[in-house]
Amino acid sequence: MNDEARNLPVKDDDSSFGFRTSFVIQAKLSRFQFRTVLLALVLLASGCQREPRADLTIINGGEPETLDPAIVTGVSEMRITKALFEGLVKLDPVNARPVPGLAERWEKSPDGRTYTFFLRTNAAWSTGEPITARDVVWSWLRALDPATGGDYAGQLFYIRNAEEFNSGKVKDLAQVGVRSLDDRTVRVELNSPVAFFPDMCAFPTLAVVPRQTIERLGERWLKARPLPVSGPYQLEAWRLNDKVRLRKNPRYYAAAETQTELIDLLPIGSPSTALNLYETGVADIIWDKDLMPTELMDLLRQRPDFHSFNYLGGYFLRFNVTRKPFTDPRVRQALALAVDKARIVRKITRAGESPATHFTPTGTANYDPPDGLPYDPERARRLLAEAGYPSGQGFPRVAYAFDASGGGAAKLNAKIAVELQQMWREALGIEIELRQIERKIFFNAQSRLDYDVSRSSWVGDYNDPNTFLDLFTSTSGNNRTGWKNTRYDDLLREANQQTDLKHRAALLRQAETLLLCDEAPIVPLYFYAGLNAYDPRRISGIHPNLLDEHPLQAIRKSPPPARLRLSKPTGRTP
């Protein structure tokens, strides 16, 4: 999609932020996008909405694939899921650190292997029934059940016999180390001390879901109305390619702290559409820079309503190590050494990103990551020759796959793909086919290892190096490379048993060096820089943090500032 922008004059009022121009995209929209924008603008102008306008409208990204906490994987879906379903722990909106959720407190044993959580006495489903410890245990075991098919089941593998149950080695649920001691108490037994376990308990996979509804309706349980939820918002409507509407849950234990009554989240993938809706006041927030026109990024970042911040996430490549020629680590190393990451950031992304010399982002808690393979075309050519492909001769024709996520993300993926293709051609003399695939098909193919090289990204689930490095353990559902290394697995396992942070970090550095330099099933490209859009004079409760965590219940929209009205003078001027 070729979106073009031009500057248009705007009225000299509060909405201009002191700028004399506004960036309104004159785009070649699809028929559906045009109707969506036109209808929204007409309804806004006429005040003839068929339903009440939301108190807060957010452009959230693509259409959710699911809102089931046990199987959700996308960032945009997780934002909604976390508003509907809460776990024992939640994340603080300011610093993204774990704070009490459905559990009012927890205790850790002296050896760090046992956690005891105490539920709030006023924790209740939105339909009025109490949330019990048995609901928690059932929800966790459901997420762990291989029949559920969740990619994040591994988040629970720190629990005694959880991995064995997931793999089928243990059949008896009673042997899994999570149980209810009474209606308000959950006991969790871990394989070894896990310093970040409270952070894990805030992740959507461990949220509490309604057992009776799921057992009654099966896979259709999210269509139940009313849908019992455990979080601050209820699901009022989910209309495909239109919006997800959330309404404040009055039975949430902290309902008094929920700032906004009615929220609409729009599944907009086109940056031109997103910016038009934002600039015309139809939407109040744009969450991601993928929903902003790349060609305007330098200008948008200068505006006071566009907010930049660093967070734990990055863009990288995966090799399918089960397919030739990528079964040979020298080939993988050669392609990695031929990538000029600084060139990609300088030429394409242009939103404050930094080249990734390692996989775990800079700033991750209690960790100093090792450097991976540098940009070194000469060494890359030597390794490719050693693997049997001097100057690229005889190298098989392989494909680089990337997803058509929609809007800015699709354009960015395509530009990076073309740049990689050119780098590999220039440095190694090999020709890589480019293959853009529809989003759902792409991720399904990646999971089935039906690709050669593919683009990937990852955002940390909690502030610890483990959230990045455990992706590539042999049992991780998010591995998606076919790479298995027992030494790597052992290093991760040993590291996560340590209570000495320095010793733990040293073991993790060994693992990351093995991943990036010795074996190279992945190639980090760059670390993300966040960018979102909102008027800080009217929107409060959004705080920059390393996890890009912005709970919806903390966000508030204030009325527009009253305009100063000058009254006519009375009497005579002295």
Image: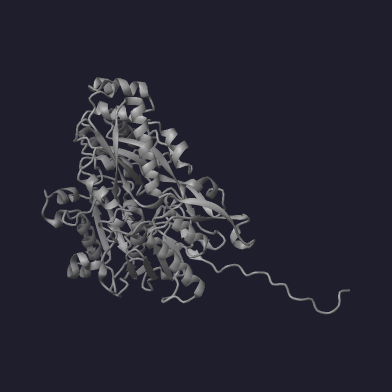
In this view, the residue in front, 564 or 160, is 564
Q: Is residue 210 visible?
A: no
Residue 126 sits in quarter:
bottom left
Q: Position of residue 221 (x, y in %)?
A: 23, 67
Q: Is residue 143 left or right of residue 372?
A: left
In this view, the residue in front, 255 or 529, is 529
Q: Position of residue 529 (x, y in %)?
A: 45, 45
The C terminus lies in which quarter of the figure? bottom right
For image coordinates 68% across by 69% down, the residue present is: 564
Q: Is residue 569 left or right of residue 292?
A: right
In this view, the residue in front, 19 or 123, is 19
Rendered view: 391 above or below 314:
above
Rendered view: 419 above or below 238:
above
Rendered view: 411 above or below 241:
above
Q: Position of residue 487 (x, y in %)?
A: 22, 32
For image coordinates 36% across by 61% down, the residue present is: 80
- Scheme of image coloration: one colour
For image coordinates 25% across by 42% down, the residue present is: 479
Q: Is residue 81 visible?
A: yes
